[in-house]
């Protein structure tokens, strides 16, 4: 595993990130002491379930339309009107 010091990270950020993007893990060092580990993200799980927020809103409120918006309510509470 390669390592870089903070100065190199500051001046060559693009190059360091390019190496990480290619799958390399890099140790960040301060005064030759390990400080952090910079590693690529794990691939996203394609089978992950994404919540259907639109359906949740419909389940809670149905087809009802609100007469006042949240902005109007906040303005009244703050005394902006």
Image: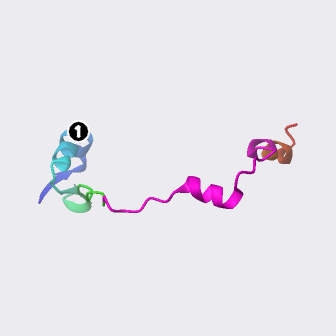
Residue 76 on image: x %, y %: 85, 44
Q: Is residue 30 visible?
A: no
- Colour pattern of the rendering: rainbow
Q: Quadrant of the C terminus?
A: top right
Residue 25 on image: x %, y %: 18, 57
Q: Nearer the viewer, residue 57 or 42?
A: 57
Q: Which residue is depicted at the point 79% across and 46% down?
A: 74
| The image quarter in which residue 49 lies | bottom left
| The image quarter in which residue 33 lies | bottom left
Q: Residues within 10 Å of mark 1 (few under 14, many from 20)?
A: few
Extreme-front residue of the structure: 63
Taking the image as shown, residue 29 lies to the left or right of residue 68, namely left
Q: Which residue is depicted at the point 44% across and 59% down?
A: 50
Element at label 1: helix
Measured along the vertical axis of the image, is residue 30 above or below residue 72?
below
Q: Which residue is depicted at the point 19% across and 50% down?
A: 20
Queried whether the magenta region covers residue 62, the answer comes back as: yes
Residue 53 on image: x %, y %: 55, 55
Span shown in magenta: 46-72
Taking the image as shown, residue 77 lies to the left or right of residue 61, namely right
**Residue bearing mark 1:** 14
Q: Quadrant of the N terminus?
A: bottom left
Q: Nearer the viewer, residue 60 or 2?
A: 60
Q: Nearer the viewer, residue 38 or 77?
A: 77
Q: Which residue is depicted at the point 84% across and 48% down?
A: 77
Q: Is residue 38 visible?
A: yes
């Amino acid at each position: 595993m390669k390592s870089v010091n903070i100065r190199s990270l500051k001046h060559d950020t693009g190059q360091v990130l390019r190496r990480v993007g290619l799958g390399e893990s890099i140790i960040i060092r301060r005064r030759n002491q390990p400080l952090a580990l910079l590693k690529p993200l794990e691939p996203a799980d394609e089978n992950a379930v994404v919540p259907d927020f639109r359906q949740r809103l419909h389940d809670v409120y149905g087809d009802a339309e609100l007469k006042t918006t949240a902005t109007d309510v906040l303005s009244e509470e703050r005394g902006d009107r």
